[in-house]
Amino acid sequence: MSNSQSIIFNNQWSISTTHGSILSSEGSKRQEYEENLKTHHLPEMIFDKTTLKIIYLDNNLEILFNAFDALKCIDMYNNLEHVPKVSMSEIWTKSRSKDKELDYVKPYDWTYTTKYKGTLRSTDKSTWRIESTDQQLDLEKLKRQEPILFYDELTLYEDELADNGISNVTLKIRCMPSGFFILLRFFMRVDGVIIRCFDTRYHYEIENNYILREYIERESPVSLLKSEFQSTSDINSVITQLKTNLHQLEKLFFL
């Protein structure tokens, strides 16, 4: 079963969310995922019918967020230098193999780290125009008290990393009279080893013909964090302590 909600915002945008159940560990849909993603290694919980969809009604340009596209952005078998090593990880990797006859399992990104920023969809007549910018998100404006016209939180996928930590992709959206704001977050913690967070923020203000998109990659070894941040469950406080490795700002023009 799935449930949905939607809003027509400012007579210009169709915004809708759908919450779906967890993808079964067996069956044709699971097989479809494995075949299209070319891997048997998938997170424990994939919410394959959970989506956030935003459509600009004048030309049908669309921003879509879904689990499959997020999983497509995992570099599962290449550039594994960023994949942390933990005790028992080799044994655990082998235990996750579909083929129990193999003595060796090809190394893969068992943290399910994705650089997914959302899916931009164009039409035959219109396309998104993306430009780099120095314009920063107006965080003070986002902190102002405004009526909330629409709000939702979603999870696209999650894995407990064989009790070694957590890896997930979550979404939050809120619409206010001044515009809408989206936070797409990949968060990963390997207990006692490393914490990683990739945030993508979208901020639209009704007077603009573009959406501002910010993408930030942060991570730090746990050993370099102050003791009070090494085991806290307050994700927002931990993120402020992580080293920033990449910061990108773009304008997404829809007109």
Image (spheres, rainbow, N blue to C red):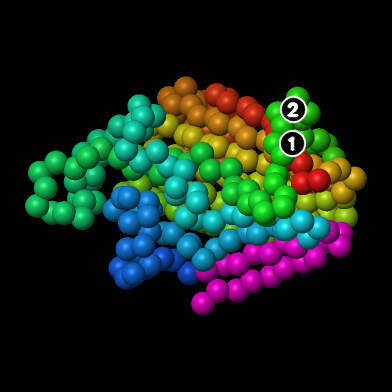
Image quadrant assignment for residue 199:
top right
Q: Residue furthest bottom?
A: 1
Foreground residue among 44 and 144: 44
Q: Earlier in the sequence, mark 2 or mark 1?
A: 2
Question: Residue 9 lies in magenta, yes or no?
Answer: yes
**The residue tagged with tag 2: helix, strand or loop?**
loop
Extreme right residue here?
207
Mark 1 lies on residue: 251
Q: In which quarter of the image is residue 79?
A: top left
Identified at 60% across, 67% down, the residue is 18
Q: Which residue is drawn at 37% across and 51% down?
A: 37
Region of the chain picked out in magenta, as a range: 1-20
Q: Residue under circle 2? A: 133
In the displayed structure, 193 sits above or below 146; it is: above
Q: Is mark 1 on a helix, strand or loop?
A: strand
From where the camera sits, is residue 144 visible? no
Mark 2: amino acid: Thr
Rounded to the nearest angstrom, the CA distance separating label 2 from label 1 is: 7 Å
Q: Looking at the image, which is closer to me, 15 or 240?
A: 15
Find out whether the residues at labels 2 and 1 contact each other: C-beta distance under 8 Å.
Answer: yes
What is the crowding at mark 2: few (fewer than 14 residues within 10 Å), some, or many (at least 20)? few
